[in-house]
Amino acid sequence: MIVVTAAGGNTGTAVVRALRARGEQVRAVVGSATPRPELDGLGAEVVVADLVGAPGSLPLEGADALYLVWPNFEPTEAAGVPRAVEGARQAGVGRVVYHSVLRPQLRSMPHHAAKDRAEEALDAGGVPWRVLQPCAYADNLDAQLPRIAETGELRSPWGLEQAQSLVDLRDVAEAAAVLLTEDGLDGGTFEAVGPQPLTAPHLAAAVAEHLGRAVRAVDTRPGTDDDYAGRCSRTMFDWYRRHGFTGSPRVLTALLGRAPRTFADHLAGLTP
């Protein structure tokens, strides 16, 4: 049995799907009793538990491994991850895989700093661990596509000059499944990075090809930072605007046993 936290989110659901495709039994931990037809359809055991408020009391009975995803831009992560790992130790879980981020040491971004501190605590957790460090998802642009099709504008809160190595979430989930199920990887930190460093104009050109209409990239600024999530978003896009967010796809290629999907591959795989 493999437990996946924050399973109602995009990342958690994708990991559950990848594990079920391998025939693994999965306990999908969600934060509320809201109906989860997609998880039910995947054949996962859906369990409601308070990861944020009580991370040490996760439903880990009989679990062989835990995929620990924290809700995005959630300020409890740095303190909560060690408590969740301690719960895994007490429950006798054999392996924890922590969902981090590419280059968590970039501590000027609060959510990176939280993940860096969480990674630092893993050695003291008493459970064999692995870390997956994904780049920004290609999927993050999917919600824009209907508006892009209407207006011909791709909005870029990270500007028009710096590139990102966007990674397909399906590849991230497949890599997570490898780390959760295969031996010989304990104590490893694994980057999950897409194969192409692409600027917003490059992305616009790919979307134009996909939609069959002209698309231009438009520079826009993120919203306010009135709360923790807003501050995380603003500092993240400010960093991307200045420095980009790129890396090497070689580690992900090794985990997958194939090249990661390109951005064009990602667009081609979307449901019409």
Image: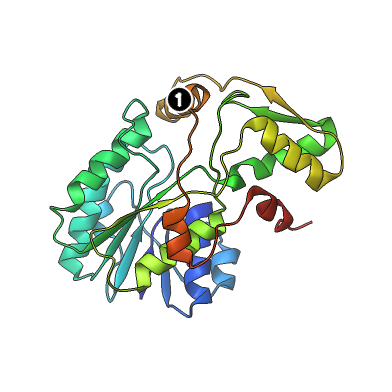
Residue 113, picture quadrant: top left
Query: Which of the pair 98/105 is nearer the observer?
Result: 105
Res 59 visible:
yes
Whole-percent x and y of residue 73? 42, 37
Q: Is residue 159 left or right of residue 73?
A: right
Whole-percent x and y of residue 119? 25, 47
Q: Name the quadrant of the N terminus.
A: bottom left
Residue 218, picture quadrant: top right
Q: Is residue 234 left or right of residue 144?
A: left
Callout 1: SS: helix
Q: Relative to residue 237, is residue 195 depicted above or below?
A: below
Question: At 86% from the left edge and 44% from the top edge, which residue is drawn?
Answer: 212
Question: At 74% from the left edge and 58% from the top edge, which residue is drawn?
Answer: 271
Q: Is residue 98 left or right of residue 202?
A: left
Question: At 27% from the left edge and 51% from the top edge, which residue is drawn?
Answer: 54
Whole-percent x and y of residue 194? 53, 49
Res 33 visible:
no
Question: At 33% from the left edge and 39% from the top edge, which residue is drawn?
Answer: 104
Number of other residues with Cα within 10 Å of mark 1, as a class: few under 14, some 14 to 19, many 20 or more: some
Q: How many marks?
A: 1
Query: Which of the pair 31/126 is nearer the observer?
Result: 126
Mark 1, residue position: 239
Q: Name the quadrant of the C terminus.
A: bottom right
* Kind of residue indicated by mark 1: Trp
Query: Which of the pair 196/112 is nearer the observer?
Result: 196
